[in-house]
Image: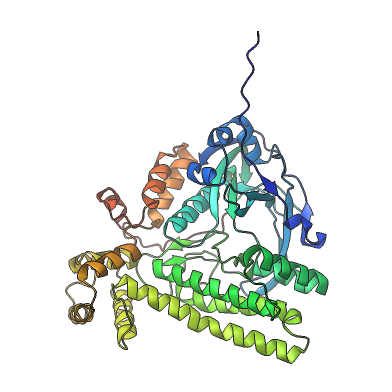
Amino acid sequence: MTEKKAIIKTGWNFDNSYARLPESLFTRLNPAPVRSPKVVILNDQLATTLGLNVQSLQSNDGAAALAGNQIPEGALPLAQAYAGHQFGHFNRLGDGRALLLGEQITPHGVRVDIQLKGSGRTPYSRGGDGRAALGPMLREYIISEAMHALGIPTTRSLAVVTTGESIIRETEQPGAILTRVAASHLRVGTFQYVSKYGTAQELRALADYTLQRHFPEVDTDENRYLILLQEVIKRQALLIAKWQLVGFIHGVMNTDNMAISGETIDYGPCAFMDAYDPATVFSSIDMQGRYAYGNQPYIAAWNLARFAETLLPLLHDNEAQAIKLAEDAIASFSELYHRNWFGGMRAKLGIFYEEQQDESLIKDLLNMMQKYRADYTNTFRALTFDKPEDTALFGTTEFAQWHELWKERLGRQQEPKASSHQSMRSSNPAIIPRNHRVEDALEAAVKQGDYSVMERLLDVLSSPYAHSPEQADYFTLPAQSTHPYRTFCGT
């Protein structure tokens, strides 16, 4: 008697609420098949949280689904339309190399988007081939998972699949597809698209959908669209503060790269700052420093103003009154951001309550760090463990004076020193995805097919606040170079 092969259910549990929106917002389209899909990295923990079977995803059928060669049961692939200001210039855009498979409903009832990035051409490709290179997809996997471990709202990476095909960029590179998980892919640019090219009814439908999906607690006869604007502002104020507190530089803060959910999205030329400098730019295309580290809060406010403009028809029938409501809401961003950032900086220094001179204490430290090119992460780590000699500031008169003021400040608190130390441990990561470590991992994977370097990096990045001896090798800074580190909008 022939033995039957056991069928392992993957666990896909799709719903497709976005597909029930007006059809002008998307194009239904299946992924373009690839030659030889192979799963090269799979996020087992995330898969389990999503209700997916890890063993099934690692199988040939699993690789086929993650590459777009097979459409999972219940999926309804589509490319989303959006627009956006790219470096300040408005463009009509859309998912040019990505497809939303559908929305996975997890065992806990959470709805998340499952998106394939690099899945082929769409009507929004604008001449592109719709594919993605292995290196940039692995970079997004590393950075997004590191951000999650740091406690920063972010899209997640479920898997990277190689395609068995080459793509041409500046050179011939191996192709890959990333499976991205997000609260949603609703963007400021989604609203800009409907505002520019859609109808008033479509705009209202999109706003109502957004409220239902991300702000279900908003159930009021008051101005619900003003509340939508205010809630998005709150989430972005918190998100950008969290970026600044760990030295993260997004690199391409176009309006189409700002998620309504408050998650970090679209990891292109992103990187983490080593030496503290507000003017730090890594992106090769940001020639004017528009998206420099120190500019990120201002760009966020600018992007939110563009979002507010799209909502004007919903805020009030009287245009002048609608503008006033929007302006008042946007004006709150600066205070909200500063409150989040200031509170985070106090925690990084072990301070539990506010005193008048705290802000100058923080700014004086940052100014010294900039002056002496002190490493941002390692400086706060050294302060956490009371090892000022490990900083580039040690030995200077101004730091000695600052250090004494800081110690006096902590001494005025009722909380014990152990509490301050614990606050600092949980606010100052021991490690970040250092640029040279990320490059080492990508080079080993892409050029040698060796994923062990990346796997070790991901392992240590998964517990950034552990401050364990095993992480010591990852504290080290890169060798000095005459050429500044540059990142690229990898495709």
Q: Is residue 315 or residue 289 the one in the foreground?
A: 315
Q: Position of residue 25 (x, y in %)?
A: 77, 62
21 over 399 or under it: above or below: above
Please give left or right for residue 175 compared with residue 387 in the image.
Answer: right
Total marks placed? 0
Residue 348 sits in which quadrant?
Answer: bottom left
What colouring method underlies this structural image?
Answer: rainbow
Assign the N terminus to one quadrant of the image.
Answer: top right
Residue 363 sits in which quadrant?
Answer: bottom left
User: Residue at 61% across / 35% down in the picture?
Assistant: 62
Q: Which residue is farthest front?
A: 220
Q: Position of residue 59 (x, y in %)?
A: 58, 31
466 over 87 or under it: above or below: above
Q: Is residue 164 visible?
A: yes
Q: Is residue 132 or residue 151 the one in the foreground?
A: 151
Q: Position of residue 333 (x, y in %)?
A: 54, 81
Q: Position of residue 33 (x, y in %)?
A: 71, 38
Please give left or right for residue 248 compared with residue 184 in the image.
Answer: left
Q: Is residue 242 or residue 389 the one in the foreground?
A: 242
Q: Is residue 126 visible?
A: no
Q: Which residue is farthest bottom?
A: 320
Q: Is residue 41 or residue 341 the one in the foreground?
A: 341
Q: Which residue is farthest top?
A: 1
User: Residue at 61% across / 30% down in the picture?
Assistant: 8
User: Residue at 51% across / 62% down in the picture?
Assistant: 153
